[in-house]
Image (cartoon, rainbow, N blue to C red):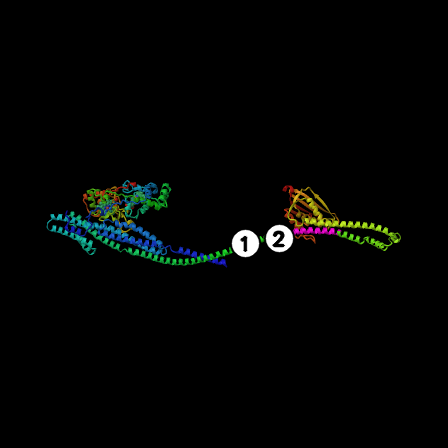
Amino acid sequence: MPMRPLSFSLALLLALPCPLDASPRNEPIKPISLTRTADPARTELGSRLFHDVRLSANNRVACVSCHDLTHGGADSRAHSLGISGKPTAVNTPTVFNAALNFRQFWNGRADSLEAQIDAVIENPDEMGSTWPDVVAKVAQDASYKTGFTEAYPDGVTQANIRNAIATFERTLLTPNSPFDRYLLGDTDAISADEKAGYLKFKQYGCVACHQGVNIGGNMYQKFGVMGDYFKQRGNPTDADLGRFLVTRDEEDRHVFKVPSLRNVALTAPYFHDASAKTLEDAVDVMFRYQLGRAASPEDKGSIIRFLKTLTGVQETSLQ
Amino acid sequence: MKMPLQLRTASLGLVFAALLVFLYIKNPAYDATAYFESIALLRQIKQLDARWELDALKSKIGVNTSYDPLVNPLSELDRLREQVNRLGIQQLQGTAADWNRSFGAYQDITEHKTSLIEGFKTHNAVLRNSLAFLPTAASDVQDAIYHLAHQEQGGKREALEHIAAQVDSVLLSSLVFSQADTEGKVSEIITELDELAAVSGSLPPAIVSGLEIFMAHVRTLIDEKKRVNGLLSGITSVPVAAHIDDLEYLLSQEQQQAAARTLQYRQYLLFLSAILAGLLLYVASRLVRSYAVINRVNQQLQTANDSLEQRVQERTLELQQAQGKLVDSARQAGMAEIATNVLHNVGNVLNSVNISAELTMRQVRTSKVQGLARAMQMLNQHATDLGDFITHDDKGKLLPGYLNQLAEALQTEQQSILDELGQLSRSVDHIKEIVSTQQAYAGAANLVEPLQIGSLIEDALRMNNSALDRHQVTVVKQFSEVPVLLLDKHRLLLILINLISNAKNAMADLAEHARTLTLSVTMVDTDTLQIGVQDDGEGIEPDNLTRIFTHGFSTRKDGHGFGLHSCAVAAMEMGGSLKAHSDGPGKGALFTLALPCQTEESTL
């Protein structure tokens, strides 16, 4: 299908961001760096805390209950269950590469991993605990106590528990995905079809929102830029308001943090409302409501194959 | 005068030292490094901020393909901001309110800028997508139109081609609009879009969907473009630099003030230090001086000490001499006693000498020798007729008888004169003896010699002999067996003479009753000799029992008070003691002399 001469020449004239030059180095998506600087003692403490049910009020739920590290850093439920068995308002995002997000939570209400931990521990539907309780329980454990006194000058404190968990989370990165290897110059790391999928991903404009090192996670976007997604879906909930809940600004209604697409193949169901059971569904929605355009099933399939190259390797030392 | 001066100096020094410490503490520990660090941080923030803005612009024109550059500075900026705030608070303690206000304002505008950039990312992404997609969307519509137009004829075909041209026109205006940043085109595009929308109802569905997609993106482009422009101008007009300059100004002002203060304090400190140094110098000079004074005083002390020692020596010598004199005088007193006794005795004997001489003289004066002379005169007168005369003369006849008688008388006379002279010469011998006995003791040094206590007591008694006789004192001797002892004969004699004389005197006033002097000698143990002298005389008042031994004490009007004192001294000199005992006045007295002694054998 030949392009109209005018359109074609204009495109050239305007020097639009056509990915003319496909040099792996200058891509909108960046690979995860392999250099690590985390303190091993603190990481170790954080790892234990992450798996420790005592962080919850009734000693039933640990971080890992919802963020299963063997399951892409999330669970397979649409909505996870907190201490009281009540489902969470939104789908559980993965903790993998959460450290690379510029804000935490779907609506970005936590500025940092540390702030996020405060929120989840004291959230009555999730862990339902209080910091004094958590600090007391951790301090009672002799091995924690010695571990903390070795890793922190002031031993077991709220800030140190938070820091240990956050330090651990900062190590929950999944580098070395086939696509990252491709970006790093290994041209054979992904197939020609997957490369084509990446090209489509860029050409269609998915990359406008899902870009950067985390392939997302660095901006807010309205869910439904090119159409009213929620009207079509029905059953509006409070959580659907997105950042509006944080800022109370009309402009922020239905605005969410663009999620990372790393390991996306492992984290179904998709979206904050878990409305998309499969990647196909999710990509369909994206085309319709985020891009406002139609795509052939081949192109979609190609993009999905590309998305599957984003599954990284969980660093073994951390398991 | 000296003490207060030193006190004043010391307190002055203390005051200055305290002032120094005060100034040192007061002196704001203003650390210029904090200032420079803050300024460096602020510059860094400014730079990061400028780069942030630049990255936004780059994202706008598509040079940046990811938004990470707009996100990455966030945490770095947060960190720097926090650091600057900490440093600022630390530096601007005095004007914390100013700092908090300025920093708060700065933080507010950075938050504002951050949210603007968030918005920019959001809208720029959508804008760029639509913009990028617009030509494709247009060509998709046109393809569909041309595809249909091929099958149509005449007016219908023209109408379709007109629509295709309209799409092209909208695309062109949209693209120009997107580049030109002008609002002018907007109404034009909207009109065209409205026209397109109006005709779309009559178009076949295959075209309508593409057309709607195209139009939606044109609208999105227009909306998002406006938004992005607004956001960008908002971003570039956020006066971050001005606020940073405010902070810098505050810091530099504080720095200048602190520098001025430091200078001032330094001057104070210098001044104070100078004063303190002066004080120190003064104190040092005082020290040197007092050192000299101490030296001098030390020397004086040394000499004083020396002279004191000398004086002590002199005094000791004097004392020794005095003691010697005392002993001497005691001895002299003793000697005087002896001398008195001697003189007394000599006087007594001289009495007999006198009497003997008188008697002899009287006898010589009344001697019958004159009768012989007269007879011789007669004989001489009758030398011629001597025979006659003797035979015839009356007187002459008597002459031979007379001469016989005379001869007899002269013989008796001679005999009695001879007797008297014999007595005389005995008396003289006695005197000689007295004198020689005295001489035997006089001047004797502290010499122990073997002696028989008994004979010594006899000597003492003899020396008092005449007085005892005169006072008709009966001497009772209760001598137990005593070996020959080594004793200071002279001193012991002196004591005994005195004690005996004393006892005799004590009994002098007894009118009608026998006077008894009891002398006793016993060995208390193997090396202590005890001699008792007891009288039944006037006795001693209890009060006087000890006083009697003091120098110059006497109850007698004519007493010289030497006696008992010198006795006690002598006893002491011999290592012994002299004690007095009396049951009271009129009850007599007992003097007990106890002397340590050694038998002659034991010293061998």
Have a look at marks 1 and 2 and say if they share a chain: yes
Q: Is residue B343 magenta?
A: yes
- In this view, which residue lies farthest toward the front? B384
Locate residue B578, reporting x and y percent: 66, 47
A8 or A271, nearer to the observer: A8
State the SS at label 2.
helix
Q: Position of residue A96 (x, y in %)?
A: 28, 43
Q: Given contact means CB atoms under 8 Å apart, are the residues at marks 1 and 2 in contact? A: no
Alpha carbon of mark 1 to alpha carbon of mark 2: how far? 23 Å
Of pointers 1 and 2, the one earlier in the residue sequence: 1
| A261 inside magenta stretch | no
Chain ID, mark 1: B
- Where residue B408 appears, x then y in whole percent? 83, 49
Q: Is residue B543 visible?
A: no
Between A305 and B318, the one lying in front of the other is B318
**Left or right of B193 in this view: B543:** right
Name the residue that disc number 1 marks. Answer: B306
Q: Position of residue B53 (x, y in %)?
A: 26, 53
The prevailing secondary structure element of the residues shown in magenta is: helix
Decide: few, some or many residues near mark 1? Use Cα within 10 Å; few <14, some 14-19, many ≥20.
few
Looking at the rendered structure, the kind of residue marked 1 is: Asp
Magenta stretch in the rendered image: B329-352
Which of the chains bears the disc numbered 2?
Answer: B
Depth check: give the residue in front, B86 or B279.
B279
Relative placement, left or right, of A260 versus B262 is left
Residue tagged by mark 2? B322
